[in-house]
Image (cartoon, grey):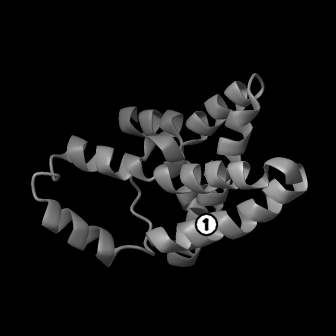
Amino acid sequence: MKFTNHIIINATIGGIICFIINRFLFFENLLIVVASGVLIDIDHVFVEIFKGTLRHPRKVIEYWKSIPNKHTGELYIFHSYEFMFAILVLGLQNKFFLIVLIGLILHFLADGLINYLDTKSFSWLRDYSIIFKIYDHWN
């Protein structure tokens, strides 16, 4: 999904959620939701480093622009269920991480909508799990 769309979705829906949760800390919480919902995509850069394609940044940027609304099938670590679960566990100890989790979930739902529209199925759900990726690799 396009970067700007993630900002709009996280700011709008996250804003409503943050307002409901705590009106007094609304702007601080909203900033955390939007930042976590956008910065999660840094793992796309990590995948490019791992694949060795980051040596050609112009080609990487052109590729990303060509697929903003396509499901790639890649495992992006910060998009995984396991990462979100770890943030949830941290959130049980510190409210900050629960606010971060809202941004991650909104990002996931936005990507999920794009993935569903692209694949017309829910087969992409498996691609968001580290455990399933390891299992699929060995079988």
Q: In the rendered view, would you say 108 is above or below 63?
A: above
Q: Give the residue displayed 66% in from the left and 65% down from the top.
A: 11
At horizontal 45% and vertical 72% (from top left) the residue drawn is 2
Q: Residue tagged by mark 1?
A: 110
Residue 61, horizontal then vertical, whole percent: 24, 67
From this viewpoint, is residue 57 visible?
Answer: yes
In the current view of this chain or complex, which residue is farthest to the top? 93
Give above or below for 59 relative to 79: below
Residue lying at the far left in this picture: please name it: 55
Instruction: Answer whether residue 1 is visible to the viewer in this image.
Output: no
Q: Residue at x 40, y 36 (%)?
A: 139
As rendered, which of 68 and 37 lies closer to the eye? 37
In this rendering, the count of numbered labels is 1
In the displayed structure, 82 sits above or below 41; it is: above
Q: Horizontal and vertical percent for residue 16? A: 81, 64
Which residue is painted at 73% across and 38% down in the image?
Answer: 98
Crowding around mark 1 (Cα neighbors within 10 Å: few <14, some 14 to 19, many 20+) is some
Q: Using the image, determine if residue 131 lies above or below residue 101.
A: above
4 relative to 93 in the view: left or right: left
Q: Identify which residue, 123 or 106, lies in the foreground.
A: 106
> In the figure, residue 117 lies in which quadrant?
bottom right
Q: Residue 89's spot in the image, x, y percent?
A: 71, 26
Residue 18 figure quarter: bottom right
Q: Is residue 76 left or right of residue 38?
A: left
Q: In this image, 65 relative to 121: left or right?
A: left
- Measuring from the top left, give residue 15's x and y in whole percent: 75, 63
Q: Amino acid at mark 1?
A: Ala
From this viewpoint, which residue is outermost toward the front?
24
User: Is 92 or 121 nearer to us in this picture?
Assistant: 92
Identify the secondary structure beneath mark 1: helix
